[in-house]
Image (cartoon, grey):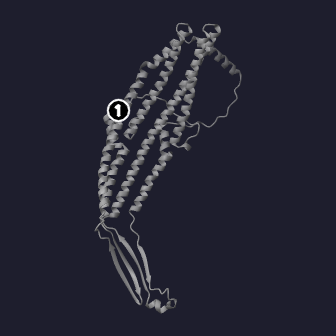
């Protein structure tokens, strides 16, 4: 089947190899090894160094600082009231006047909070921290999927590039052989030009795959942290189709237990409930007490007092009503989040099954049939038993089938990553 390749390809290569044996090769200095990362390493780098996520984590630190603020007690207030200074009668600035006629009052006041405000403020702040932490965790979940999706895209681009280069080499062999046939008068110049022009498609495939690989690696580097990888890094792994046995009910149950966005919504109910309790606490009016030292002439004395708002009009009715509505809103949000989780799992599972079936179809024989069809057409065309159109059609079919198979593998691997994404934890390796 490939006897023509032995004549026009193998023998020249053997001659070149024999010639190379007689010429000593100059030793090249070994460069630094290219860093190769796996999918798991890419995820860990992203979790540790992704700038958006690092900035998002600082929200948790801010929320913890708010807890400190919420639990602080009011400060003492110092005040000083000094009267009867004879500013407009300077001649009266005498010791006797200071001792007998001027008044001084120095005191401190303190706000006594009532209704458990401080305790409830702390609970609300702690609830806000919990919601923030779970929201950040959900951001990590999304980042993991983005990294896996981009990593698979790099694997696909690299696989497509390898295939494109191999297809170009194989078709270049076909062009070279037919150039010999043209010189021998076995084919017309029109047929040879059609074959030569078809080579452009394979060259374009190589160029497109090279661009896709560069773009994919750049996108992955941005996700994992630009400074964590060198310019010439590479990825480890291949596009594979590994069967997984999992049921939809198992995935739904796992997702309802693990999804961080659902947990954040559930924490939102506690936040809303404690906020409502704080609103009720704020209805209680605080008391301000004060103690002061008084000197009025030759009189030295202590005084005390207090003040309190009279709840005639403002009893915090609006805030209490608003927080009660917020509790109901949080409960509805949990129901919506639960439905969204189940919907996400159902959709992802359907995509997973479909991708599995498509990959299995290619592996069941279509790949081998496309290869055999190309080889048979090439063999027959070299011997004049089939037309040029049949040869070119077989080449295109083989090329399209190989690219489509790689797309199917990438889709399947992405669907596996999506299952882990919608569940909220790794359930499929």
Question: Where does residue 288 sit, x and y in percent of width and height?
Answer: 35, 73
Q: Position of residue 195 (x, y in %)?
A: 58, 15
Q: Quadrant of the C terminus?
A: top left
Q: Residue furthest right?
A: 23
Q: Quadrant of residue 74?
A: bottom left
Left-right relation of 139 to 262: right
**What residue did someone put label 1 on?**
246
Image-quadrant location for residue 355: top left
Residue found at x 53% / y 10%: 387
Of residue 247 and residue 23, the one placed in the foreground of this image is 247
Judge the density around disc 1: few (<14), some (14-19), many (≥20) Cα neighbours within 10 Å.
few
Asked whether the viewer can see residue 277, the reply is no
Query: Looking at the image, which residue is at 36% across and 37% down?
Result: 344
Residue toward you, 20 or 388: 388
Query: Is the residue 148 above or below the residue 393 in the image?
Result: below
Q: Depth check: give the residue in front, 237 or 211.
A: 211
Q: Residue furthest front?
A: 88
Residue 228 in picture, x, y percent from top left: 55, 43
Give the vertical position of 186 relative to 324 (above or below): above
**Horizontal arrangement in the rendering, residue 213 relative to residue 240 (left or right):** right
Image coords of residue 194 (percent x, y): 58, 15
């Amino acid at each position: 089947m490939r006897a023509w390749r032995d004549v026009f390809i193998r023998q020249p290569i053997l001659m070149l190899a024999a010639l190379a044996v007689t010429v000593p090769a100059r030793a090249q200095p070994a460069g630094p090894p290219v860093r190769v990362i796996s999918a798991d390493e890419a995820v860990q780098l992203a979790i540790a160094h992704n700038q958006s996520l690092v900035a998002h984590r600082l929200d948790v630190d801010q929320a913890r600082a708010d807890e400190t603020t919420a639990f602080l007690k009011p400060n003492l207030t110092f005040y000083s009231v000094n009267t009867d200074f004879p500013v407009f009668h300077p001649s009266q600035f005498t010791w006797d006047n200071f001792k007998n006629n001027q008044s001084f009052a120095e005191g401190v006041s303190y706000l006594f909070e009532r209704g458990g405000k401080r305790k409830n403020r702390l609970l609300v702040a702690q609830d806000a921290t919990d919601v923030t932490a779970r929201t950040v965790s959900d951001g990590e979940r999304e980042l993991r999927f983005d990294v896996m999706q981009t990593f698979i895209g790099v694997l696909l681009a690299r696989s497509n590039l390898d295939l494109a280069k191999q297809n170009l080499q194989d078709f270049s062999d076909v062009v070279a052989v037919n150039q010999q046939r043209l010189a021998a008068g076995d084919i017309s110049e029109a047929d040879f030009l059609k074959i030569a022009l078809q080579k452009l498609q394979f060259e374009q495939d190589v160029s497109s795959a090279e661009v896709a690989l560069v773009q994919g690696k750049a996108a992955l580097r941005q996700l994992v942290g630009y400074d964590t990888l060198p310019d010439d890094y590479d990825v480890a792994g291949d596009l594979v189709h590994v069967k997984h046995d999992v049921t939809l009910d198992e995935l739904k149950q796992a997702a309802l237990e693990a999804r961080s966005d659902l947990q954040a919504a559930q924490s939102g109910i506690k936040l809303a409930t404690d906020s409502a309790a704080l609103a009720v606490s704020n209805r209680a009016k605080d008391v301000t007490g004060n103690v002061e030292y008084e000197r009025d002439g030759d009189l030295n004395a202590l005084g005390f007092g207090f003040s309190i708002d009279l709840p005639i009009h403002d009893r915090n009715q609006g805030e209490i009503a608003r927080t009660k509505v917020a509790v109901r809103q949080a409960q509805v949000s949990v129901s919506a989040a639960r439905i969204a989780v189940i919907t996400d799992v159902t959709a992802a599972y359907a995509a997973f099954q479909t991708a599995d079936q498509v990959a299995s179809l290619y592996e069941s024989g279509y790949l081998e049939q496309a290869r055999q069809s190309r080889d048979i057409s090439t063999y027959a065309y070299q011997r004049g038993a089939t037309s040029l159109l049949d040869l070119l059609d077989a080449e295109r079919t083989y090329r399209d089938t190989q690219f489509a198979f790689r797309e199917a593998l990438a889709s399947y691997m992405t669907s596996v990553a999506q299952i882990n994404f919608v569940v909220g934890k790794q359930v499929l390796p």
